[in-house]
Image (cartoon, helix red, strand yellow):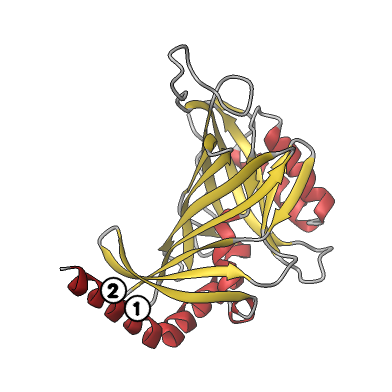
């Protein structure tokens, strides 16, 4: 039985290795199409943040059992992506404007889209940092951003900075999938974490799921580890992608965990509505939550 299992695993890896060039070529094509299309698209993002309540690196209740995460904030934002103008690489980054917090309206979707347009016009690092600070002021902690764009790391140029190896087979929903382990091999990229007024980038490692039948990217997981004041900090996320009605693969959800010394301290669940493109969607506005 063990021999049969090992033989099946080896056969699966061999097939993934053989298919890897074609599969990764399809992934690169979808990543490049995403980079072309998403800057002209707008979506509505809903963030549910769950946190532990208490003080200290490890929180427990009266029975000395680990505390559960509790829903602390639900934030709805108008969301778009734009190139960072003061970056040499003109990298694509996230921009958002909050329209509701815990069910209470902050501004209309139209006002938020107008503010987004102004922010995108001056889309430098300082403008983006101000948006992140505005986002964090609603009581959010351990905010991490740009995870939804992790597929952009798999363009043809991006794959030159990654080490990618077949790692077997799996399922994503109803789809059979091939999986690949990947690691950043070049500095300067990575996920941007935002804690208070401090931001930092971390080198990333993760896993890629592609549909076995045609190589369509379905999911990417990613994690990064660092040490802060003697504590082991791990940020990890799983990003699911779907084919949008406009013919490009778009993020559907991001599940992010902020882990301190082995304990999940914060969970951020981002969900994205359909991505709309001005003109192509008849300029239909997003509907703010009631």
Image disc number at residue 28? none
Q: Residues within 10 Å of mark 1 (few under 14, many from 20)?
A: many
Work out whether residue 235 or residue 84 is closer to the camera in this orientation and state it: 235
**Residue 71 location, x and y as percent?**
48, 27
**Residue 127 location, x and y as percent?**
81, 49
In this picture, residue 32 sits left or right of residue 85: left
**Residue 278 in sight:** no
Relative to 50, residue 17 above or below: below
In this picture, residue 83 sits left or right of residue 179: right
User: Residue at label 1?
Assistant: 13
Cα separation, mark 1 vs mark 2, equals 6 Å
The answer to whether the residue labelled 1 contacts the one labelled 2, judged by CB atoms less than 8 Å apart, is yes
In this picture, residue 102 sits left or right of residue 140: left
Picture quadrant where residue 187 is located: bottom right
**Residue 135 in sight:** yes
**Quadrant location, the N terminus:** bottom left
User: Residue at label 2?
Assistant: 9
> What residue lies at 53% left-to-right and 42% top-to-bottom?
257
**Residue 215 location, x and y as percent?**
38, 77
Classify mark 2: helix, strand or loop: helix
């Amino acid at each position: 039985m063990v021999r049969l299992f090992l033989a099946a695993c080896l056969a699966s890896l061999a097939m993934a290795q053989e298919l890897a060039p074609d599969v990764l070529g399809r992934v690169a094509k979808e990543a490049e199409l995403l980079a072309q299309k998403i800057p002209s698209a707008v979506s509505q993002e809903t963030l549910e943040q769950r946190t532990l309540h208490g003080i200290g690196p490890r929180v427990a209740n009266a029975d000395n059992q680990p505390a559960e995460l509790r829903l602390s904030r639900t934030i709805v934002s108008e969301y778009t992506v734009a190139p960072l103008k003061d970056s040499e690489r003109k990298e694509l980054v996230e921009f958002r404007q909050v329209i509701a917090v815990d069910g209470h309206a902050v501004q209309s979707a139209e006002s938020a889209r107008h503010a987004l347009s102004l922010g995108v016009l001056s889309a430098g690092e300082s403008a983006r940092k101000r948006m992140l600070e505005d986002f964090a002021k609603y009581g959010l902690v351990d905010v991490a951003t740009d995870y939804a764009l992790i597929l952009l790391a798999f363009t043809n140029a991006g794959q030159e900075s990654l080490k990618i190896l077949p790692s077997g087979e799996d399922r994503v929903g109803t789809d059979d999938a091939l999986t690949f382990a990947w690691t950043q091999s070049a500095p300067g990229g990575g996920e941007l974490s935002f804690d208070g007024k401090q931001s930092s980038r971390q080198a990333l490692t993760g896993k890629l799921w592609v549909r076995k039948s045609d190589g369509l990217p379905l999911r990417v997981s990613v994690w990064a580890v660092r040490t802060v004041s003697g504590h082991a900090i791990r940020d990890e996320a799983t990003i699911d992608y779907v084919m949008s009605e406009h013919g490009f693969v778009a993020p559907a959800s991001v599940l992010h965990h902020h882990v301190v010394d082995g304990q999940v301290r914060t969970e951020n669940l981002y969900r994205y509505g359909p991505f709309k493109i001005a003109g192509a969607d008849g300029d239909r506005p997003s509907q703010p939550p009631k």
